[in-house]
Image (cartoon, grey):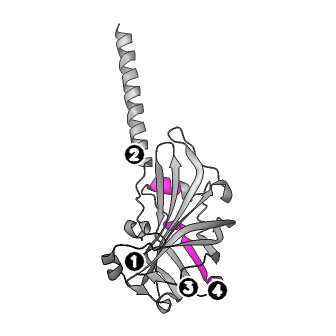
């Protein structure tokens, strides 16, 4: 009887320990980063500059080509996000160390250029142990490849007339380079002019395999092979 009591007690301790360990791992591996868009939701909803109410039309200011054309530089609080979908939720990584330019030419989309770079050592998911693993040799190899870049090859044609505070659609086609491996991608994006700044918000999908990686798996979580890359950029002249 005593042996049975000891065995039951031991089993309870083991089960309780396993549950506690699962909860601790689950909490540490959960999403800690919320995506912050540089374009307000109401501006995104307006899409291709739809007509608003009479009051909104009066309040909205026209933006001239002179205000838009020229070289714009990525400034704070610009961020790049990587999102991975697990068997439980989507986990976001954020990187605020972004540099680059966008040369705007409303008259000639073929004359527009754009480029950007991200310091991968600044990538952050809110969990140090997870970040260290992702930046290690099994995945991003940040020590060997400290920067990821995006060079735009073409932009979709932008409308000639803009309204301040209203988003316009734009596609960016170009080369995304991660770990020294190049991948042709298209960002579906929106651009907005407000308060003397340009805002750009866009996403594209890649896979772990595109850059020579395998999607991570563990006893606790599985992950999908897809990765969402999201640009949330603020630019100033």
**Picture quarter with the N terminus:** top left
Alpha-carbon span between mark 2 and mark 4: 49 Å
- Closer to the camera in the image, 78 or 196: 196
Residue carrying label 2: 27
Which image quadrant is residue 117 in? bottom right
- Closer to the camera in the image, 167 or 226: 167
The structure residue drawn at horizontal position 64% and vertical position 66%, both measured from the top left corner, is 185
**3 or 1: tag closer to the N-terminus:** 3
Alpha-carbon span between mark 3 and mark 1: 18 Å
Residue carrying label 4: 111
Residue carrying label 3: 104
**4 or 1: tag closer to the N-terminus:** 4
9 over 152 or under it: above or below: above
User: 10 Å neighbourhood of mark 4: few (<14), some, or many (≥20)?
Assistant: few
Residue 222 sits inside the magenta stretch: no
User: 10 Å neighbourhood of mark 3: few (<14), some, or many (≥20)?
Assistant: many
**2 or 4: tag closer to the N-terminus:** 2
Q: Depth-wise, is mark 3 or mark 1 nearer the camera?
A: 1
Q: Position of residue 56 (x, y in %)?
A: 33, 76
Can residue 205 be seen here? The reply is yes
The structure residue drawn at horizontal position 67% and vertical position 54%, both measured from the top left corner, is 209
| Residue numbers of the magenta segment | 107-133
Q: Depth-wise, is mark 4 or mark 1 nearer the camera?
A: 1
Alpha-carbon span between mark 1 and mark 2: 39 Å
User: 10 Å neighbourhood of mark 2: few (<14), some, or many (≥20)?
Assistant: few
Can residue 196 be seen here? The reply is no
Residue carrying label 1: 165
**2 or 3: tag closer to the N-terminus:** 2
């Amino acid at each position: 009887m005593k042996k049975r009591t000891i065995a039951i007690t031991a089993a309870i301790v083991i089960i309780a320990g396993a549950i506690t360990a699962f909860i601790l791992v689950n909490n540490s591996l959960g999403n800690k980063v919320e995506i912050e868009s540089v374009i307000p939701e109401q501006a995104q909803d307006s899409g291709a500059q739809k007509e608003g109410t009479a009051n909104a039309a009066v309040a909205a200011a026209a933006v001239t080509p002179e205000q838009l054309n020229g070289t714009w530089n990525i400034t704070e609080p610009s961020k790049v996000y990587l999102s991975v979908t697990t068997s439980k939720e989507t986990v976001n990584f954020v990187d605020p160390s972004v540099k680059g330019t966008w040369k705007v030419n409303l008259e000639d989309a073929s004359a527009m250029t754009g480029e950007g770079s991200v310091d991968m050592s600044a990538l952050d998911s809110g969990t140090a142990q997870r970040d260290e693993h992702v930046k290690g040799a099994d995945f991003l190899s940040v020590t060997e490849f400290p920067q990821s870049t995006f060079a735009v090859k073409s932009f979709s044609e932008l409308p000639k007339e803009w309204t301040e505070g209203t988003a316009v659609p734009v596609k960016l086609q170009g080369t995304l380079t991660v770990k020294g491996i190049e991948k042709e991608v298209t960002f579906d994006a929106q651009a907005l002019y407000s308060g003397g700044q340009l805002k750009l918000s866009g996403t594209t999908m890649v896979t772990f395999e595109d850059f020579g990686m395998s999607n991570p798996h563990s006893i606790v979580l599985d992950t999908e092979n897809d990765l969402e890359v999201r640009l949330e950029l603020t630019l100033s002249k």
